[in-house]
Image (cartoon, grey):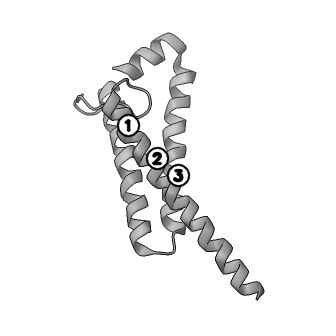
Amino acid sequence: MIFSAICEEFGVIFGAGIIGIFIMLLYRGVRIALDCNRRYYSILAAGVTTLISFQAFVILGGVMKLIPLTGVTLPCVSYGGSSILGTFILFGIIQGLYILKRNDEEEMEMEEEV
């Protein structure tokens, strides 16, 4: 119920901003998954993005009474040591895939110049 507490204390605009951040994370993760050259990395990025997005959807949907409320934590908002650690590991995987994609693009540019 952390999302409802945030909306109550800071207002609907702040709550909409949090939802916007999760939509942006979903967009960036899908963009990374689509841009990866290797199929394994693409599937990995899509899976990690789906995991984070689904976790956010479950808690936001539960708070808005669209689906039954569960004990899942809101990524990077709810307090929980293992939840925060797991979410940061997932973000690290996505960031690593982005770096690999960028390095592959730079190598391809160097090969084209030669």
Q: Residue at x 38, y 66 (%)?
A: 43
Residue marked by disc 1: 85
Between discs 1 and 2, the one toward the N terminus:
1
Residue marked by disc 3: 27
Picture coordinates of residue 33, whole percent (x, y): 48, 63
Separation of marks 3 and 1 at Cα, in angstroms: 22 Å
Please tell me how crowded label 1 is: few (under 14), some (14-19), or many (20+) other residues with Cα within 10 Å. Answer: few
Q: Residue at x 56, y 67 (%)?
A: 101
Separation of marks 1 and 2 at Cα, in angstroms: 10 Å
Seen as rendered, the residue at the extreme bottom is 114
- Pick the residue in front: 112 or 66: 112
Q: Nearer the viewer, mark 1 or mark 2?
A: 1
Please tell me how crowded label 2 is: few (under 14), some (14-19), or many (20+) other residues with Cα within 10 Å. Answer: some
Establish if 114 lies above or below 9: below
Residue marked by disc 2: 91
As helix, strand or loop, the secondary structure at mark 2 comes to helix
Query: Which quadrant would residue 71 be assigned to in this image?
Result: top left
- Pick the residue in front: 78 or 113: 113
Query: Which quadrant would residue 72 be assigned to in this image?
Result: top left
Q: Which numbered circle lies on residue 104? A: none
Contact check, label 3 and label 1, Cβ < 8 Å: no
Establish if 62 lies above or below 100: above
Picture coordinates of residue 40, whole percent (x, y): 39, 71
As helix, strand or loop, the secondary structure at mark 3 comes to helix
Between discs 3 and 1, the one toward the N terminus:
3
Picture coordinates of residue 12, whole percent (x, y): 52, 20
Point out the image quarter for the C terminus.
bottom right
Give, as a three-letter code, the residue at label 3: Tyr
Between discs 3 and 2, the one toward the N terminus:
3
Point out the image quarter for the N terminus.
top left
Give, as a three-letter code, the residue at label 1: Leu
